[in-house]
Amino acid sequence: MLLCPICQSPLTLTNKQWACVNRHSFDVAKEGYVNLLAVQHKRSKNPGDNTDMIQARQQFMHGGHYHFLADAICDQLGEVNANTLLDLGCGEGYFTEAMFASLKPAELFAIDISKAAVRLAAKRQPAINYLVASNHRIPLPEQSVDVAVRVMAPSQLSELQRLIKPGGHLLIVRPGARHLYQLKQQIYQDVRLHDEQADELEGFQLLEQHKVGAELTLDQAAMGQLASMTPFAWRKTDKLKEALQSKTSFEMSTAFVLDWYQRD
């Protein structure tokens, strides 16, 4: 199922090493994942989320705060038979593990550009095919995926068109209008709401759109994790830093939109 990221030839596994006919080879790490992100395709030495963001996300997720979203994702995917499931931008694997446990697909491939995130995810669940790769260069063959899932991550439409089988499905999870509204108030003078209109994707038909959310009460530790795990980590204002130090309880709105598509 895997393709060489350099020449796109099929890879064969021998003695914990994937190799193609052109002698490009990629070792399986001790944690069980394989790094298929070619050096020439990197834009930085260590692309993706850094270790601090990943650890904060792991702590927050395993605190159960987004359990409702994991349930909603699995309920939606449970409507179809996904023998081959692809998780695009899996991060540290919280939602990937939920899908694996609930749906029990024959093959589950999970990719992320962050090596640190994939290493952490693979340590917890070696039965999942974790790959370090880019969502814009996915090392899988054409029409090899029954269902692809993209949770709060970017992807390239041409890759989705290439990979998902005719009649297959795509689930895109993105922020709802007031997602993390109170956190954004600590950063921006004027808070803009997220657009909930679904994208029109060539080659795909939008079947359904669902909205889920929860009002959370977070302690100081959980709020610090939330602020550190999102892109807002790069924009910590003095106002936010003061709030994180002075308050012991935080009210936080979470909102997500689930767009469910089918491949033509």
Image (spheres, helix red, strand yellow):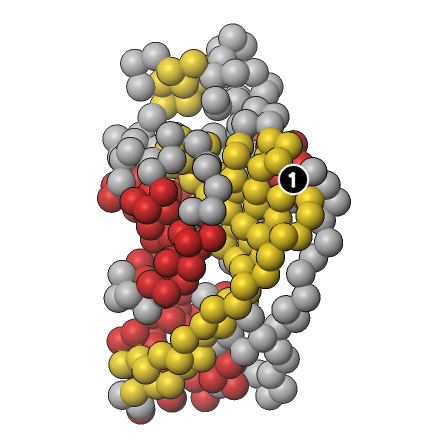
Q: Secondary structure at mark 1?
A: strand
Can you tell which quarter of the image residue 258 is in? bottom right
Q: Nearer the viewer, residue 80 or 31?
A: 80
Residue sitting at 52 percent across and 39 percent down?
Answer: 147
Tell me the kind of residue under disc 1.
Arg
Drawn side of residue 173 relative to residue 252, left or right: right
Q: Residue furthest top?
A: 21
Instruction: Confirm whether residue 231 shows in the render.
Output: yes
Residue in the picture at 43% in, 40% down:
110
Q: Which residue lies most toward the bottom here?
A: 246
Say whether residue 41 is left or right of residue 205: left
21 relative position to 198: left or right: left
Mark 1: give few (<14), some (14-19) or many (20+) Cα within 10 Å: many
Above or below residue 107? Residue 195 is below
User: Extreme front residue here?
Assistant: 79
Q: Left or right: where does residue 61 sit relative to residue 237?
A: left
- Residue 170 image position (x, y, % from top left): 57, 45
Q: Position of residue 166 (x, y in %)?
A: 64, 32
The quarter of the rendered structure image containing the C terminus is top right
Viewer-proximal residue, 57 or 1? 1
Figure quadrant of residue 226:
bottom left
Question: Residue 174's x, y, as percent?
Answer: 55, 62
Residue occupying image coordinates x 52% and y 16%: 10
Q: Is residue 119 visible?
A: no
How many numbered tags mark residues here?
Answer: 1
**Mark 1 lies on residue:** 263
Coordinates of residue 2 in the picture (x, y in percent) = 48, 23
